[in-house]
Every structure is written in C-alpha cells, then in structure tokens.
C-alpha cells in the first residue's frame, strides 16, 4: 500500500529541531488565544451518498425567488443563455491564469476585443485587459495619476461607492499618498480629482473643475454608457459586472482602466495588441506588461498579478450577443423601469432624493416606519427592496429584469 503523505513524522521532527521549536503549533503562538477556535465540533464523517442528501436538505432552506431591487455596486441583470454555454467551454476554462507572453491566440484576441469595446464605450484611446474589480481599478488609477503628475496628493468625492473608498484608502496609505475626501476641493496642488457618475446615490454628476496640472478620474457604470454620453476625463475606470457577470455571491467581478494615449505606459496590468504575422494573417500579441514579474521591479506600475480574463471573456460575449442596438435597448428598459418605480413611489408620498438618475435612486420614507423594518416587510413578501442608508433613506436599483408586475407588487406593498 502506497503512502502519499508529503512528510513523515521523522521529517517533521527534524524540521522542528532545525528551527528550534518543539511542534508546528508554536509557529502560531503570535496569534492571540482569543482569536483561535478551540473546538471545531466536527460531526461524524458521512459517505458520499449521505453527504449529497444532507447538502440537498440544507439547500432547500434557501429562499432565492425574490424580485431583486438591490444595487449599490452589484446588479442582477439578464444574461443570455448562449453566454454561459460558450464561456464554459473547456478551451476557455483553465486553472492557469493566462498572463504570460505565450498566451494562446484565442485568449489574446478576447483581451484585444475587450479593450476595444471598453475604449468604444468610454470614448478613450486605450484600455487595459482588465483588473480585479472597480475598486482596485479606481485605486490603481490614482497611483497612475500620482506617477504622471509626480504629486502625492489626491482628492476623492465623498459620494463614491464606500467600498471603493475603503480600498482606495488602503492603497494610498501603503503608497504614502495624501488623500482628501469631500464634496469638492479648490486645492491647487493635487495629482487628481476622482468622482463617480452616476454616483453611489445614482445621481449623474458633472466632472469637477481642475487646473492644468491635475488629472480627472471618472468612475462610471459601464452599462449607463449605452444611453449617457461618456464623461470627458483623463482616466475612466469602473466595474463591468453588469456585462454578463452574475451576482455570484459577490464575485468574481472585473474592473477596467481606460485612458488617453499619452498615459498608456502608466497603466496597471497589461495590453494586448493586434498585428500581422509573416504570412499576412492577423496575429495577437501581449504588447505591454507592466508587472514586476516582467520588468525591473522599480519600473513596474503595479503588483497586480492576476487578470479577470474569464470575466472579460463573458463581457465580450455579452456585448457581442446583444450588439449595439440590443445593449442600448436593455439599458433603456432599466432606465424606464427605474423611473416608473420612482414615479409610483412619489405618488405614494415618498420623497425621491435623486433627481437625475439612470437606474438607481434614493427615496425617503413618508411614514414613521424604520427603513430596515420596511425592507424586512418587503422581503417577507418576496421583494428585496433596496439598501437602507439610514432610518429613513433607501437606495434602490432597477434593471430590465424588474418588469411591470414586480414594480406594481413593490408599490402595492
């Protein structure tokens, strides 16, 4: 009988002796006792058949058939069945993260198409082949701006997604960059000004004023650009979860950074390019790699080492399946449904606080009822009504999936 253990007891003992400890447990003495779980309370082991039955009985307790009006950065959108059928093919699924120069032509072509689509939607010159999510894209864009302007002070609007702001704070603290958070800033010594449109509360806003040395960074809802003119800015960032990615319990999603041509060498991640081979056929190459693994560490623009290549593939498939006309129509439905719900709520006496919105808005309850209790009541009746911002205000998002029946049910409750 073969033994597949990596180490024998003798080898473990020898390793402990070599580093001067009695047991591997001593390696974890730095962790406070209060943070350690003393008893995992494991149940008796089950056979595969028993485990399947047990998991199915637990899964039946989940309630998933809700009309979803949740938003705040993640949205339940229609995804064509053909997308999953194509994206799940074995050619595209791999445990290997494709980031080296020898990536297959198919993967490189997908990256190139993704970059092209993002540039087209954002009206920018160049885009990278995606990063982790919208939050990391925003933070990386600020680092870009600081390198370009050689200035270590950045302004960020307080009305951006609070999750994005937390990631930005972490990045900038580690990079020793001063962060100013507020409504606006007249400070003339900034690397950049960051704003979000539509902002966290759904309001479509204009770019802040800036001087000649500052850069503007716009965080956008990529789907809103089907209807809204893209903001005129130096760097555009965002999350592309709405382009064919399901909610997936919070991820994985994908982020993008697009910018003017002059700034392309400061982009985080990589850029795929298109050329021709010696026989004149289309060929795709990894044109720009800004990681420390590829170039001198002091010249690297970012330590982002992975790339949401499969998520980018889903985005390309989504936009290809819908086409320009379909993409516009789907997002017009989101816009129309959101305004139908807002009008209905206003007639019920609630105050709509977001005046100029795409598909997400804030309303204030007209009664003494607490917002959390109000949302709980909606949930008991099959509706996830939104996110409570405080005792009275609720952030609600509407997509093409929220048809007239769901909107009427929301209003009737």
Image (cartoon, grey):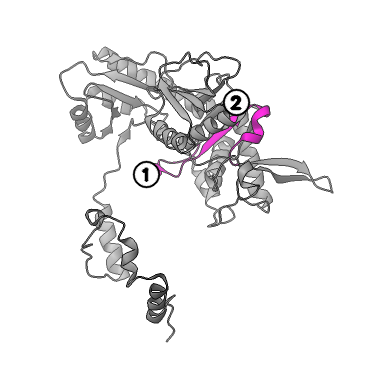
In the rendered view, does 207 fall on the left or right side of 72?
right
Q: Earlier in the sequence, mark 1 or mark 2?
A: 2
The answer to which of 348 and 174 lies nearer the viewer is 174
Q: Is residue 140 above or below residue 249?
A: above
**Residue 71, percent across and down?**
37, 31
| Tag 1 near tag 2, CB within 8 Å | no
Counting other residues with Cα less than 10 Å from the Cα at mark 1, is it few (<14), some (14-19), or many (20 or more)? few
In the rendered view, does 208 fall on the left or right side of 60?
right
Say if the magenta span includes residue 257.
yes
Say if the magenta span includes residue 113.
no
Could you give the CA–CA distance between mark 1 and mark 2, rounded to whole angstroms? Answer: 38 Å
The answer to which of 342 and 287 lies nearer the viewer is 287
**Residue 397, percent across and down?**
36, 27
The quadrant of the picture occupied by the C terminus is top left
The residue where tag 1 is placed is 249
Q: Is residue 92 above or below residue 4?
A: above
In the rendered view, does 106 fall on the left or right side of 371?
right
The residue drawn where x is 71% and y is 45% is 284
**Residue 122, percent across and down?**
58, 26
**Residue 229, percent across and down?**
55, 18
Q: Residue furthest left?
A: 368
Res. 290 visible in picture:
no
The quadrant of the picture occupied by the N terminus is bottom left
In the rendered view, does 230 fall on the left or right side of 47?
right
Res. 29 visible in picture:
yes
Q: Is residue 86 above or below residue 392?
A: below
Q: Secondary structure at mark 1?
A: helix
The residue where tag 2 is placed is 149
State the image quarter where residue 368 is shown: top left
Q: Residue furthest right?
A: 279
Q: Which residues are magenta?
A: 242-269
Q: Secondary structure at mark 2?
A: helix
């Amino acid at each position: 009988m073969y033994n597949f253990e990596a180490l024998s007891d003798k080898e473990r003992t020898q390793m402990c002796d070599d580093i001067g400890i009695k047991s591997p447990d001593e390696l974890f003495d730095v962790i406070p006792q209060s943070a350690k779980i003393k008893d995992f309370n494991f149940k008796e082991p089950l056979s595969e058949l028993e485990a399947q039955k047990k998991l199915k009985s637990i899964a039946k307790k989940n309630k998933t058939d809700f009309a979803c009006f949740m938003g705040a950065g993640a949205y339940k959108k229609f995804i064509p069945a053909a997308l999953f059928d194509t994206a799940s093919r074995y050619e595209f699924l791999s445990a290997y993260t494709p980031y080296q120069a020898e990536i297959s032509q198919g993967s490189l072509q997908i990256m190139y198409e993704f970059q092209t689509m993002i540039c087209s939607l954002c009206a920018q010159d160049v885009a990278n082949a995606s990063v982790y999510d919208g939050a990391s894209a925003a933070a990386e864009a600020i680092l870009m701006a600081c390198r370009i302007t050689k200035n270590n002070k950045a302004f960020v609007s307080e009305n951006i997604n609070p999750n994005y702001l937390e990631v930005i704070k972490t990045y900038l603290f580690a990079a020793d960059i001063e962060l100013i958070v507020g409504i606006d800033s007249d400070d003339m010594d900034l690397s950049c000004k960051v704003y979000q449109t539509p902002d966290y509360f759904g309001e479509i806003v204009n770019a802040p004023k800036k001087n000649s040395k500052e850069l503007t960074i716009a965080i956008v809802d990529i789907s809103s650009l089907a209807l809204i003119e893209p903001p005129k800015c130096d760097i555009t960032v965002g999350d592309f979860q709405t382009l064919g990615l399901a909610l997936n319990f919070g991820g994985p999603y994908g982020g993008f950074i697009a910018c003017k041509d002059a700034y392309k060498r400061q982009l985080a991640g990589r850029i795929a390019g298109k050329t021709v081979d010696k026989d004149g056929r289309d060929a795709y190459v990894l044109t720009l790699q800004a990681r420390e693994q590829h170039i001198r560490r002091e010249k690297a623009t970012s330590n982002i080492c992975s790339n949401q290549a499969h998520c980018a593939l889903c985005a390309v498939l989504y936009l290809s399946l819908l086409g320009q006309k379909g993409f516009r129509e789907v997002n017009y439905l989101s816009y129309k449904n959101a305004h139908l719900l807002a009008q209905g709520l206003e007639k019920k006496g609630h105050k709509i606080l977001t005046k100029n919105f795409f598909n997400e808005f804030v309303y204030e309850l007209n009664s003494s009822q607490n917002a959390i209790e109000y949302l709980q009541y909606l949930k008991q009746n099959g509706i996830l009504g939104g996110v409570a911002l405080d005792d009275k205000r609720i952030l609600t998002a509407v997509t093409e999936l929220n048809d007239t029946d769901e909107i009427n049910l929301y209003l009737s409750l």
